[in-house]
Image: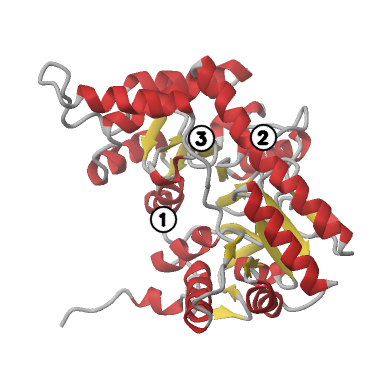
């Protein structure tokens, strides 16, 4: 008799975005002629930067010639891309990150979900609330939690993020082993100052903890002095793993390329107290379970760091931030309070009512899809997230529809 991993039965009835998709599908079936504008899931809409597209075409042509054809590449990523990342994203900002500390992958979501495999099952985990569901669900699947009671899993330490703390939690009073942080934040759009991140780094060093720092939206930071990497903080090399993605930076949601940074200084401990290199452990896991990102895609990602690529990616993120500015203005005009949208592509709106009730109102009356905050955790109840990833015409039409419903 083959037994199931019964930890899956602890998961809430449906994954947030799957639940949204079901409701939208039901609405479409009942209203086949109604145009729906999706402002929920953070998928990009604008074409790839020209520099990336040119590099992609060139590399694809190389694959058609025997003398330039490439088969399996290094699982960790080609040297040309790892070097470009190290110089462009870290060394240029004073962060001491070497190219061989970078692991290229097809998705930050996958890396964030998979990284927990190299840690013991009895570790204590701190999770922000509201939170990107993958952080929680992958640890539930691994058996690190108890049951879900009142929208929280037993065994997790929840870090409440709210208006009072500016959506940046302080370190907990009790020691924990693994800490998930995301800045700019998904879903709230909040950012952390250097002083706030220093508190977390100091806490992790004092408790021999590891910070999993999700920086997928760092390209949207515009406020001077706001850190774009945890490694801008002294001591972070000893305690932090950072996740980055080209999905929102350069519109790679359909082409798939990301990377994870694991410094060689980073250690974890076995049951006898002996230290082990997390870099070496992740390299072993990565090499065993991943065959690498395709050569043409990695060449396209390398082009992000060219002068033209940098200019074009900046224009791309500026475009989405202008969408965010329009959304913030419209929401404020309707008398609702919101945060985000200034250093992030998400706007977190206080609806003053149940999150799913507000979702259904916008869907059924305006034909606009948002993301219910309750799906991100208990502290998200009463909020919704709007995404700035859309065409300008769709954003403007959606805002007009929402205004007509809420006035």
Q: Earlier in the sequence, mark 1 or mark 2?
A: 1
Q: CA distance from mark 1 to mark 2?
A: 42 Å
Q: Residue at x 73, y 41 (%)?
A: 192
Left or right of residue 79: residue 184: right
Seen at 41% across and 40% down, the residue is 274
Dot 2 or dot 3: first in sequence order is 3
Residue 404 located left or right of residue 384:
right
The residue at 65%/44% (across/down) is: 183
Looking at the rendered structure, the secondary structure element under dot 2 is helix
Secondary structure at numbered mark 1: loop
Give the quadrant of the N terminus.
bottom left
The residue that disc 3 covers is 250
Q: Spatial distance from mark 3 to mark 1, Cα to Cα?
A: 35 Å
Q: Disc 2 designates what residue? A: 318
| Mark pair 2, 3: CA separation | 12 Å
Please tell me which residue lies in front, 281 or 313: 313
Above or below 47: residue 11: below
Residue 120's disc is 1
Q: Nearer the viewer, mark 3 or mark 1?
A: 3
């Amino acid at each position: 008799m083959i037994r199931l991993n019964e930890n899956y039965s602890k998961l809430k009835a449906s994954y947030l975005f799957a639940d949204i998709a079901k409701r939208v599908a039901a609405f479409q079936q009942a209203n086949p002629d109604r145009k729906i504008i999706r402002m929920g899931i953070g998928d990009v809409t604008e074409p790839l930067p020209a520099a990336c597209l040119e590099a992609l075409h060139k590399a694809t042509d190389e694959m058609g010639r025997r003398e330039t054809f490439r088969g399996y590449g290094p699982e960790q990523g080609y040297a040309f891309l790892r070097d470009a990342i190290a110089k462009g994203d870290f060394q240029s900002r004073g962060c001491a990150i070497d190219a061989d500390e970078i692991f290229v992958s097809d998705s930050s979501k996958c890396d964030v979900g998979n990284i927990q495999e190299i840690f013991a099952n009895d570790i204590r985990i701190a999770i922000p609330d509201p939170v990107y569901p993958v952080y929680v669900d992958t640890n539930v699947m691994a058996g690190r939690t108890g049951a879900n009671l009142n929208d929280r899993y037993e065994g997790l330490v929840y870090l409440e993020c709210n208006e009072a703390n500016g959506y940046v939690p302080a370190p907990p009073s009790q020691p924990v082993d693994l800490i998930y942080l995301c800045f700019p934040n998904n879903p709230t759009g909040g950012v952390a100052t250097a002083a706030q991140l220093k508190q977390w780094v100091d806490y992790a060093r004092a408790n021999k903890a590891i910070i999993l720092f999700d920086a997928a939206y760092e390209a949207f930071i515009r406020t001077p002095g706001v850190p774009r990497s945890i490694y801008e903080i002294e001591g972070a090399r000893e305690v932090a793993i950072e996740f980055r993605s080209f999905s929102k930076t350069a519109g790679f949601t359909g082409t798939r390329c990301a990377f994870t940074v694991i410094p060689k200084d980073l250690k974890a401990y076995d049951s006898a107290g002996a230290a082990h290199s997390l870099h070496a452990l992740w390299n072993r896991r990565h090499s065993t379970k991943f065959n690498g990102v395709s050569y043409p895609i990695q060449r396209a990602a390398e082009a992000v760091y060219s002068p033209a690529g940098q200019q074009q990616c900046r224009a791309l993120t500026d475009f989405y931030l202008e969408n965010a500015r329009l959304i913030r203005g419209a929401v404020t005009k309707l008398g609702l309070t919101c945060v985000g949208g200034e250093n992030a592509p998400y706007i977190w709106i206080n609806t003053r009512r149940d999150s799913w009730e507000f979702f259904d109102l916008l869907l059924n009356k305006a034909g606009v899809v948002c993301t219910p905050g309750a799906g991100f955790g208990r502290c998200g109840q009463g909020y919704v997230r709007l995404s700035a990833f859309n065409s300008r015409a769709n954003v403007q039409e959606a805002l007009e529809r929402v205004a007509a419903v809420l006035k």
